[in-house]
Image (spheres, grey):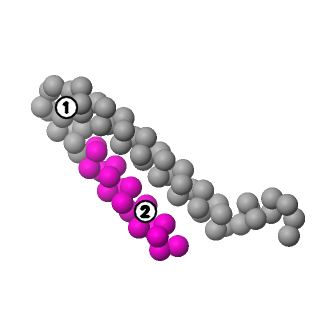
């Protein structure tokens, strides 16, 4: 096996994909959390809460898929 060849394995690519996805979702969750802390409008808080819920659900799904691999 040549140097760097293992980086091209499908398993490795999948791992990187899930790591990147998890990091992206966590960053978005932090952004929404920050906006929630600053928001005063109830309607906006409700929308942000919905977005946060969707992000958390997707994070949970991604982690479940990764655990199955």
For mark 1, give the secondary structure: helix
Q: Spot the residue most to the bottom.
A: 68
User: Label 1 to label 2, Cα distance in Å?
Assistant: 29 Å
Q: Is residue 59 above or below residue 29?
A: below
For mark 2, give the secondary structure: helix
Residue in the picture at 26% in, 50% down: 53
Residue in the picture at 67% in, 67% down: 10
Q: Is residue 7 magenta?
A: no
Residue 8 in which image quadrant: bottom right
Residue in the picture at 60% in, 56% down: 16
Residue 52 in which image quadrant: top left
User: Which labelled disc corresponds to residue 23?
Assistant: none
Q: In the image, residue 51 lies at what x, y percent?
A: 28, 43
User: Which labelled disc corresponds to residue 63?
Assistant: 2
Q: Quadrant of the N terminus?
A: bottom right
Please state the extent of the stretch shown in magenta in the rendering: 51-69
Q: Is residue 26 above or below residue 10?
A: above
From the image, give the main secondary structure of the stretch colored magenta.
helix
In this rendering, position of residue 49 left or right of residue 8: left
In this rendering, position of residue 60 left or right of residue 12: left
Neighbours of disc 2 within 10 Å: few (<14), some (14-19), many (20+)? some
Neighbours of disc 1 within 10 Å: few (<14), some (14-19), many (20+)? few
Q: Is residue 15 above or below residue 53?
A: below
Q: In the image, residue 21 lies at what x, y percent?
A: 49, 52
In this rendering, position of residue 53 left or right of residue 58: left
Q: In the image, residue 58 lies at what x, y percent?
A: 37, 56
Q: Is residue 61 magenta?
A: yes
Which residue lies under the disc numbered 1? Answer: 44
In this rendering, position of residue 15 left or right of residue 44: right
Q: In the image, residue 67 lies at what x, y percent?
A: 46, 70
**Mark 1 or 2: the one toward you:** 2
């Amino acid at each position: 096996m040549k140097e760097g060849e293992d980086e091209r394995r499908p398993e490795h690519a999948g791992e990187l994909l899930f790591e990147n996805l998890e990091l992206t979702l966590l960053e978005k969750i932090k952004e929404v959390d920050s906006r929630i802390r600053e928001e005063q409008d109830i309607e906006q808080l409700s929308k942000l809460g919905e977005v946060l819920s969707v992000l958390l659900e997707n994070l949970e799904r991604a982690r479940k898929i990764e655990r199955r691999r």
